Image (tube, rainbow, N blue to C red):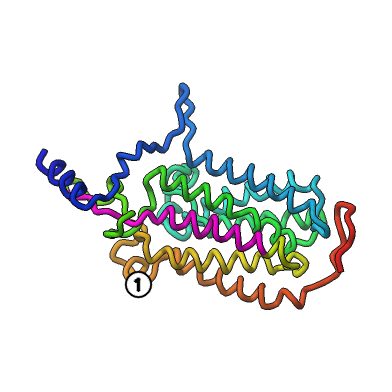
Amino acid sequence: MILPILADAAYAGTGHIRFADLGLHPDVFTLGFFTLRWYSLAYIAGIVVGWWYLLKLLAQPGAPMARRHADDLVFYATLGIILGGRIGYVLFYAPEMLSSPLRILRLWDGGMSFHGGVIGTSLGIIWFARKHKLNWLRIHDYVACVVPFGLFFGRLANFVNGELWGKPSDVPWAIVFERTVPTGFVEPARHPSQLYEAGLEGICLFLLLWFFFWRTKARYQPGKLVGLFLLGYGVARFIVEFFREPDAQFAGTFFANTIHMGQVLCIPMVLAGAFLIATAPGRRQRIEPTAGLESVA
């Protein structure tokens, strides 16, 4: 009884918000044996809103595919996200699961890796493009413009779940999350790093890609938009990792004390993004329409 009283007094003295007081819960509702979770809803919202925005992009001159291709693409991309995200998590963050293959199928055990999801989605797009004889790099450009929706909703779901919190901090907006330290210790206020990522990887990255798609001719330089996405996400994630608590399984290791695994995985993204942006002007070509609109020189 004494520790909770002391903890309440400490929180009152700092004025920090307690996560428990926000009234948030991982589950949206439960109906019998079925439970809808905010994380699942974030995936659905990201795919649906992304599909809607993709159709808007495809309606512009010189699109790399027709609207009829969009539904098929969503299937391949979704499959890539799920398989790549899960396999990436196992390989990058929890290789011990390889000794118990059934654990890999339990998606709620551990989570998903965004970097793995990127690889999986890219492979899905390449497969889709080869099947329909389309330009895979230009399709990547268009898909890159819609990914920030999923990132935004996903990071908000992380916040609602009270997971992937930041490092201890005394900033006025720090939040006291639950179960971040062993039982019996006073929970410190922490950076709401999930919201930092929602803002940088979601809103800011979307606005960057929106500007280059709608206000420049970047979409006529294959690889430029996806390059901007890779560079923008890589830099944003690398920065946020300085405020984010390292994954528990890396405690006391190089990936916690020197550089986080998330930062290591961002380095090739930044380099690949910079390369695609730098070489995009050389791939400038006459863009012939797929859906009947005028060609663009």
Residue 56 vs residue 259, the one in the foreground: 56
Residue 151 image position (x, y, % from top left): 54, 52
Give the SS element for disc 1.
loop
Q: Magenta stretch? A: 185-211
User: Could you tell me if residue 95 is visible in this image?
Assistant: no
Residue 91 image position (x, y, % from top left): 48, 59
Q: Quadrant of residue 226?
A: bottom right
Whether residue 219 sits left or right of residue 84 in the image: it is right
Q: Decide whether residue 251 is among the magenta residues.
A: no
Q: Which residue is pictured at 24% across the width and 50% down the height? A: 15
- The correct choice, above or below, for 223 with respect to 96 in the image is below
User: Could you tell me if residue 186 is visible in this image?
Assistant: yes
Residue 133 vs residue 54, the one in the foreground: 54
Residue 152 image position (x, y, % from top left): 53, 51
- The correct choice, above or below, for 160 with respect to 133 in the image is above
- Quarter holding the C terminus is bottom right
Whether residue 34 sits left or right of residue 129 in the image: it is left
Circle 1 crowding by C-alpha within 10 Å: few under 14, some 14–19, many from 20: few
- The residue that disc 1 covers is 258
Q: Which residue is pictured at 79% across the width and 73% down the height? A: 284
Q: Which residue is pictured at 47% across the width and 57% down the height? A: 197
Main SS of the magenta segment?
A: helix
Q: Quadrant of residue 141?
A: bottom right
